[in-house]
Image (cartoon, helix red, strand yellow):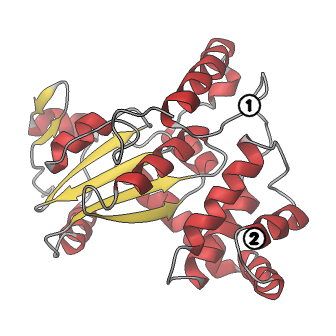
Amino acid sequence: MSPRVKPVTFFGIGNISQKEISNQQLHSSPQDKNKNTARMSSSRKVVELFYDVTSPYSWLAFEVLCRYRNVWNINLKFKPAFLGGVIYGSGNHPPALNPSKLLYMVSDLTLLSEYFGVPIFQKSYLPEKGSLNAMRFVTAVSEREKQGDMLERVSRELWKRKWRSHKDITQPTSLTEAGIEAGLPSNEVKEILTLSASQPIKDKLKSVTQEALEYKCCFGLPFIVCHVNGKSEVFFGSDRFEVMAYFIGEKWMGPYPYNPIAQK
C-alpha cells in the first residue's frame, strides 16, 4: 500500500489535493518527512540554503539570508550542492543554452546586483566551466571546518573570484588562493584540497545534491527549504524573500534589514 500523501500548500496556487500531488510527484518521501521532523525538534526556525558558487543567484540569496539570520532569529544551514547534478537530475536545461534566457539574465543580474548590494560584475556571457572541483572543495571545508564561519567565508571568496574578478575557480592553484584569501593557513588549504579529492567528500556532495532533488520540485539553485513548527516550504531563486518571511512569521524589510531605507 502506498504511503499516505498529505496536502501541501503552494503559495500562489492554494492547496493541491493528495491526488494531484501524487500525480505530479511534488511530495517528499516518507524518509524526507522523518528527516524534516527531526530537523524541527527545536522550536527555532530552520532555513536550509542549497547553493553552488557557480550560481550568481545563489550568491544573492546567500548574502541576504546572512543579513537576516539574526533579524529573523533563524538557524541558517548552508548546504553546498552541485548545480550540474541538480539540472541533470531534474531534467532541466542550463539557461545559457537558451539565447533569450541568457540575454535576460545579463540584464536581470545587473539590476539585482544593484538592488541587493552584491558586487556581481559579469561579462556579456556566462562562463561555461563547471563547478564540480569548486563544490568538492567547499564540501571539504564544510566537513573539516564545522565550527566558526569558514564555510561562509570560503564560499563568499569563490563567488567574488568568479562573479566579481572573473578569476578561475576550477584549478587547485585557484582554490588555494581562494582558501588563503578566506583566512585559511596554507597548510590547511593543502590538506583540504587533498580531502576534496577523496571518495567520502565526493559522496557527501552527491548526497546533498540528491537531498535537494528528493524534494521533487527542485530544478535549480538556490533552493531554500524553511522548517517552522513541523511544517516545511520550499523556495527557488533569490526573489522570494517576502513570501518566505510570511511563511516563517517574520517581516521582510528589503535587502538591508538593519537600515531598510538605505539601498546602498
Q: Nearer the viewer, residue 213 or 120?
A: 120
SS type, badge 1: loop
The residue to which callout 1 is attached is 122
Q: Is residue 59 above or below residue 178?
A: above
* Residue 82 position in % (x across, y down): 60, 54
The residue to which callout 2 is attached is 179
Whether pointer 2 and pointer 1 mark residues with C-beta atoms closer than 8 Å, the reply is no
Q: Residue at x 37, y 49 (%)?
A: 224
Is residue 234 visible to us here?
Answer: yes
Please report whichever mark, 2 or 1, sits nearer to the chain's N-terminal start: 1
- Number of marks: 2
Q: Is residue 162 above or below residue 91?
A: below
Is 110 placed left or right of 51 in the picture?
Answer: right
Is residue 203 visible to us here?
Answer: no
SS type, badge 2: helix
* Residue 114 position in % (x across, y down): 56, 29
Q: Residue at x 12, y 50 (%)?
A: 5
Image quarter of residue 212: bottom left
Q: Residues within 10 Å of mark 2 (few under 14, many from 20)?
A: many
Q: Nearer the viewer, residue 69 or 123?
A: 69
Q: Is residue 166 above or below residue 190?
A: above
Q: Residue at x 90, y 66 (%)?
A: 173
Is 70 placed left or right of 10 in the picture?
Answer: right
Q: In the rendered structure, which amino acid carries the disc numbered 2?
A: Gly
Q: Nearer the viewer, residue 54 or 156?
A: 156
Q: In the rendered structure, which amino acid carries the disc numbered 1?
A: Gln
Is 248 placed left or right of 155 in the picture?
Answer: left
Residue at the farthest right position: 173
* Residue 55 position in % (x across, y down): 61, 42
* Residue 79 position in % (x across, y down): 48, 63
